[in-house]
Amino acid sequence: MEDSEKIMNTGQQSPKTAAKSKDQMLSGAAWRTGADMIGKILGVVYIIPWYAWMGRFGNEANSLFSMGYNIYALFLLISTVGIPAAIAREVARYNTLDDPNMAYRLVRQMLGVMLVLGIVASGLMFFLAGPLSALVGGKDSADLIPVMKSLALAVLIFPSMSVIRGYFQGLNQVKAYAMSQLLEQIVRVIWMLAATFAIMKLGSHNWQNAVTQSTLAAFIGMLGSYAVLFYYLQKSGNLNKLINPGPVKSKINALEIFRSTLHTAIPFIVIGSAIQIFKIIDNSTFMNMMPWVTNYSHNELLVLMSYFSANTDKLTMVLLGVALTLGSVSDPLITEHYVQGNRRELATLVGYNFQLYVGFMLPAVIGMSLLTKPIYTIFYQIPSGLQSSLFVFAILQTFLLGLYMIVYPPLTVIGSHKRLAMRIFTLTLVIKLVLQVPMILIFHTYGPLLATTVSFLVGVFLFIRKLHELTHFSIKNTVRGIQGATLLTGFMAIVVIIVEIILGFIFGKSPGRIASVFIAAIAGGAGFYTYLWFAAKLGLLEKWFGPRGLSLRRKLHI
């Protein structure tokens, strides 16, 4: 009761305190957004020199890298199970209760728990590297084993590192959190490129070793992140307090927090891992089933897999990141309106969320699809017909995958619908598994994409239908808003096509990398401005962004 009163009393802030809190929030958002944006740019741009230095083995190397990373990403999700968010929540709570020593003790206890979890997860990935490699890479997958083992080192330290990040997030010291993420990416990319250049240009020219060093970079990057976190702990004077916390006013059990977080987070993590799980299914079935109906060698299969998976994933993940960001912003608001019983506001928010998603994602996927040739040339090579068509398929499919990232979270936070969300996910997974093998045997490289598309269509439809039952959002108003974005995208597409044709006369039918940069920038820029211009003229900017849309319109002098 006393704790509750203390928390309630914090709501009675003076104007000065409220202003300070707002400044902290804005500062934190700026740091997180900036670090995340730079990290995403680095995560895409590095592929240009990396792929080029791999020479004729670029596609095989990218597939090997991607197969290892798909397993690694799943292990990261399992090894943290939502603990960073729980740590941030508890640290903020105990600081609000004026019991910072309890927060120090909690973090110290959770570091021990997560260190053990990291050792277990890392050990499993390391010692099961052989079977896991055979699962996702087929029978001739010996090259994948050292990749898996190198990534196991990163799994070892990531869970404990996530506790410290959660601690800084709970203190609202987002600069430390953001800088650790940023330096992790910078160190990782530097190690990847330096090691790859040393091996492929100066050393043994062994592309498998270069890939192993590239995946080891994840561990090296995390060491850099750890260094930043410890620097900020030392600078703030919190390191000694974490080691030797003083007397506490409350009692807490780190294992109990771990168990409760695990119970709450498992459905969210499992459903949220759908895309990652489907990628692993694609890897394992394609590499194991294709030898039944073709005479392709192991390396030739790696090349084909890069066409529909590895090469496209590097770019589509940026688009999926936008969807994830939209979802993370709207979920707390949806939960708030549901709990407060604001049904009308909830319905409006859900419908608006769909319109905003389409307004962002539809022009992005259509624009990238139309600019497939220059984009693919910039990052990889001048694409063949098969490469282009698979890239377009994967880009268009991203719209559906991103929609899934938007529609599943509300069911996990609204009321007690987690079991229903799990059932929908399970049905989606079953459809994927049932269709996967026959689709591969019949359609080869298109098979995994077709199986994913059909299964996600069913899953997304069921999620949307249940959302409508719960919130009663207006389908008519939502469709009307989507029609506006679709019309704008059509205008944008016409401009992109015309500009690309004109630039084709200037740069020729097969432009190189530099010419492709100009084509993508000019045609894409023209299309983007066209979209914004029509959005402003039709009043959609104000509808989507409110006063910020009006401000953007003034800046563009529209």
Image (cartoon, helix red, strand yellow):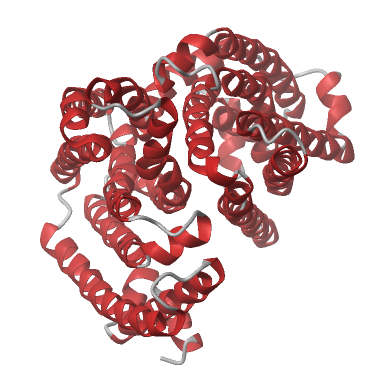
Eyeballing the image, is 446 above or below 319? Answer: above
Q: Nearer the viewer, residue 428 or 338?
A: 428
Q: Residue furthest left?
A: 476
Residue for point 21% across, 34% down: 451
Q: Residue furthest front?
A: 295
Residue 433 place in picture, x, y as percent: 22, 23
Eyeballing the image, is 407 above or below 276? Answer: below
Q: Nearer the viewer, residue 285 or 251?
A: 285
Q: Nearer the viewer, residue 218 or 469?
A: 218
Q: Identify the image quadrant of the C terminus.
A: bottom left
**Residue 360 position by quadrant:** bottom left
Q: Is residue 347 shown left or right of residue 12? A: left
Residue 16 place in picture, x, y as percent: 70, 61
Q: Nearer the viewer, residue 530 or 127?
A: 127
Q: Is residue 200 shown left or right of residue 526? A: right
Residue 387 place in picture, x, y as percent: 35, 51
Residue 128 place in picture, x, y as percent: 52, 9
